[in-house]
Image (cartoon, rainbow, N blue to C red):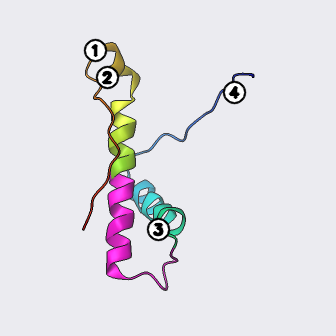
Amino acid sequence: MTSVDLEFEHLNSTVDALRRSISNRLMYGVGKDAVTAQPRDWLHAVELAVCDRLVARWHHPAAIRTGRQARLLPCRWSF
């Protein structure tokens, strides 16, 4: 087996980046497009996008160096 170096997109905190992340999560995480999505689908997409940002912050190198990284649990919300 060989090791593969993966590069992940840095999640920016701009409005456009968050909008794009929510749109991607709606399509690829929830499985709906913007036309047929119900308000509940949009809410779920927002939750997934926010969860991505929380996990990215926990994995940030500064948090790892200072020992502030959290034990990762899956971001799940049940309604």
Dot 4 surroundings within 10 Å: few (below 14), some, or many (20 or more)?
A: few
User: Where does label 3 land, which residue?
Assistant: 30
**Nearer to the camera, 64 or 74:** 74
Where are the magenta residues, as a range? 32-50
| Magenta-colored stretch includes residue 54 | no
**Nearer to the camera, 13 or 72:** 72
Q: CA distance from mark 4 to mark 2?
A: 24 Å
**Nearer to the camera, 62 or 45:** 45
Q: Are marks 3 and 1 in contact (CB under 8 Å)?
A: no
Task: Give residue 56's position: percent from left, percent from top.
Answer: 39, 37
Compared to residue 34, the image places residue 13 above or below, namely above
SS of the residue at dot 3? helix
SS of the residue at dot 1? loop
Compared to residue 45, the image places residue 59 above or below, namely above
Dot 1 surroundings within 10 Å: few (below 14), some, or many (20 or more)?
A: few
Q: CA distance from mark 3 to mark 4?
A: 28 Å
Compared to residue 78, the image places residue 53 above or below, namely above
User: Where does label 1 land, which residue?
Assistant: 66
Q: Nearer the viewer, mark 4 or mark 2?
A: 4
User: Where does label 4 land, which residue?
Assistant: 4
Callout 1 amino acid: Thr
Task: Give residue 74's position: percent from left, percent from top.
Answer: 35, 45
